[in-house]
Amino acid sequence: MALVTKAIKGTKDVLPKDVHKNQYIEATCLDTAEKFGYKEIRTPVFEHTELFQRGVGDTTDVVQKEMYTFDDKGGRSITLRPEGTAGAVRSYLENGLCNEALPQKVCYLTSCYRYEKPQAGRLREFHQFGVECFGTQSPLADAELIALAKAVFDNLEVKDLSLEINSIGCPTCRAEYHKALKEYFSSRQDELCETCRGRLERNPMRILDCKSPVCSAIAADAPVVTDYLCDECKEHFDAVQKYLKAQNIEYTINPKIVRGLDYYTKTVFEFVSTGIGAQGTVCGGGRYDGLVDELGGQKTPSLGFAMGLERLMMLLEAQNAPFPQAAVPDLFIIALGEKATLKAVEIAGDMRAEGFEALIDLNQRSLRAQMKYADKLGAKFTVVIGDNEVEQGVARLKNMANGEETEIALTTFVSGFYNISLSEQLADLEINGEEFDFGSLFGIKNEEE
């Protein structure tokens, strides 16, 4: 029988055998951000379309070509979020975070949606880890933001990443830069793609970010923004570099970085890898001092970044990064008969209450089939319970790694299993030749105390 439907193009399932990798990355991101003072925020998956038109910018590819926009049953234009910053700013304003102590630091793990051509590391439903810092104009904040992104990569043991930074100035100095770009691109206007010809008057910096090979070749010799920075923006950019050097963070200045969204000002940056093909930018961000007031708040200097989790996963897998092992059951209880099943249910409940993963066979198959199933699941221990074991109150606990068996009382199974598990852990540590204070490690008091 044919499937009724399949996953939509540009989406991807994460299966149980792989999800522990995603959870590890996500936990590392959140834990690292928390050490820098960032707290998690969660915003809706869809917003009023105007939020992204005003926030992301109507000259961007995202707004012009890629958003999933529809009218709801009330006739309101709704858009699935294409990125996380605009929604975070809306929440910051609507919920009064702007009235609390500044700066406000938030982070998020979020799904985003863009109608793009699916390719490696670029899906139509994709996921980001992002951070936003509201209410500081200090260049120290820019450097700390970059340090946070780097710390995430360091904690995940990502290799061969390069940091590229740039300043795209403020509205004052960028106006002069726009004049220079218009003059340069106007001389080759007929060679530009249709989209970039439209950008020439509204926002010529967007041409620098065009993916068309022809436009990219033309843009290669365009004026660079760092030649047009005002004194304030130049001082800010110099200070950012000073603070990066103080943290021993290596970087290169790439004057072609403009980022793909209109809200950026001053500092912009990207972490780039050459190990995942054309989609080499793993993290990008910068300062957006005009976005909060653009969306209806008081002028609030702010900054943030987002990293694509699918691209990060690709990079980690390509580098054979040390992911933790997937969790496996601590105990699989093989029950043979109704009395044994009742006892197995009781033991499994007690084990789970103590924090162990304990399973029983829901299909109540034969001994051989259950043992085979436990082995496929990778269970650390198994115990077989039949009528005799229930009557005698004892059973044999089997270590699936080495085949050793231990008799254990069913009446005190939980504490007995804990002792078996503890001895196994101690044995492993002793085999490795490590010297630990076992008492403090496992919460056991020294008898002399």
Image (tube, grey):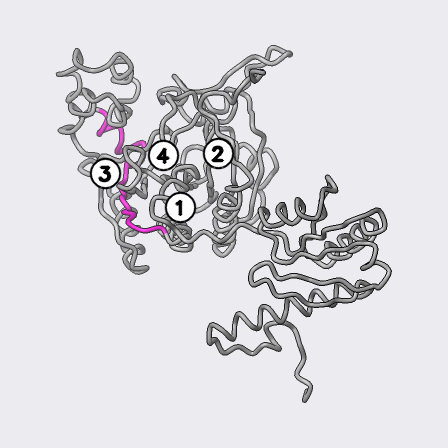
Can you say which quadrant of the picture contains the N terminus? top right
Q: Spatial distance from mark 3 to mark 2, Cα to Cα?
A: 28 Å
Q: Residues within 10 Å of mark 2 (few under 14, many from 20)?
A: many
Residue 104 visible in the shown view = no
Image location of residue 415, percent across then percent down: 74, 67
Disc 1 vs disc 3: Cβ atoms closer than 8 Å? no
Q: Residues within 10 Å of mark 4 (few under 14, many from 20)?
A: many
Q: Which mark is residue 84?
A: 2
Tell me the distance, in whole angstroms, between the alpha carbons under discs 1 and 3.
17 Å
Asked which quadrant contains residue 284, the reply is top left
Instruction: Name the amino acid type tagged 4.
Output: Tyr
Is 190 within the magenta?
no
Where does residue 190 sit, x and y in percent of width and height? 17, 11
Dot 4 or dot 3, earlier in sequence: 3
Which quadrant holds residue 286?
A: top left
Label 2 SS: loop
Q: Quadrant of residue 352?
A: bottom right
Residue assigned mark 1: 137
311 sits left or right of 133 in the view: left
